[in-house]
Amino acid sequence: MRHLLLIAIPTLFFVGCVSSGKYDKLDGEFKASQVANEELTKENDGLKKEISGLQDEVKQQGILIQTLKGQLGHASSNVEEMKTALKQAAERKKEAERRIQEYSTLLSRFKKLIDAGKLQVKIVRGRMIVELPSDILFKSGSSRLSDKGEGSIKEVAAVLASIPDREYQIEGHTDNVPIQTSKYPSNWELASDRAITVLNTMLTAGMPPDRISVASFGKYKPLNANETEEERTANRRIEIVVMPDLSTLPGFDELNNISGTATR
């Protein structure tokens, strides 16, 4: 029995030695695989972070692209607005130059009458006006033209009729002194009758009837306060207004389209 035990112990020792070597080898391989796995895990985590960062960057780039597109659209809109503004400015400049030329032409043609103190040419609220004092044209309370007044009106009519494609409105104005006669119950009627008298004289001088009209303002558009005789004299007047040609104004086509659409 003792002999068998002695033989068994070395055998078990030998088997134990072999198992330990394999174990160490397997343990080393296992540890190496753990290290490799940890490195792969770290690398994977790093790649995930990198991917996440790239995704954030792509997102930011997308936002930037949309912002730039918006800015580009806004810039394009601004460019178009600037083009439109420049076009309108050029049209206004052209219209202003045309009106200055027209005003200068009227001044030169009316020079003799202006120098004689028979009329004035001026711009009031953007309208060109030929102003004739009523005292030169009419006696007090009357709508009958004086001989000198009739001559002045005919000269004015000849000049205005020679300007193509222009319409005129004759406006009658009085002072604030009341008038009450069977013919003229108020200054409205007196101013109106005087304007009509001027119109008829201009028609006989060759003014086309489709280019002229009349209006009465009575005492309600004075040039001065009507406090002195000089102020009242200045307020009694006939004004021939050169009616603006709206078709020459900037934006007329758009306005015309809108009004045309509204009336359909």
Image (cartoon, rainbow, N blue to C red):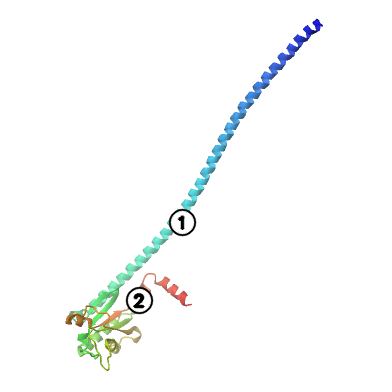
Q: Which residue is mark 1?
A: 73
Mark 1 / mark 2, whichever is N-terminal: 1
Q: Name the front one of labels 1 and 2.
A: 1
In the rendered image, residue 263, in percent from the top left (x then y), is placed at 46, 77
Q: Secondary structure at mark 2?
A: loop
Q: Which residue is mark 2?
A: 245
In the rendered image, residue 196, in percent from the top left (x then y), is placed at 29, 88
What residue sits 42% from the left and 74% below the top? 256
Could you tell me how far apart the alpha carbons at marks 1 and 2 are, in whole angstroms?
37 Å
Q: Is residue 199 above or below residue 17?
A: below
Q: Is residue 188 left or right of residue 40?
A: left
Q: Secondary structure at mark 1?
A: helix
In the rendered image, residue 159, in percent from the top left (x then y), is placed at 27, 82
Viewer-proximal residue among 145 and 165: 145
Q: Is residue 21 above or below residue 197?
A: above
**Image quadrant assignment for residue 240:** bottom left
Give neighbour class at mark 1: few <14, some 14-19, many 20+ (Cα, 10 Å). few
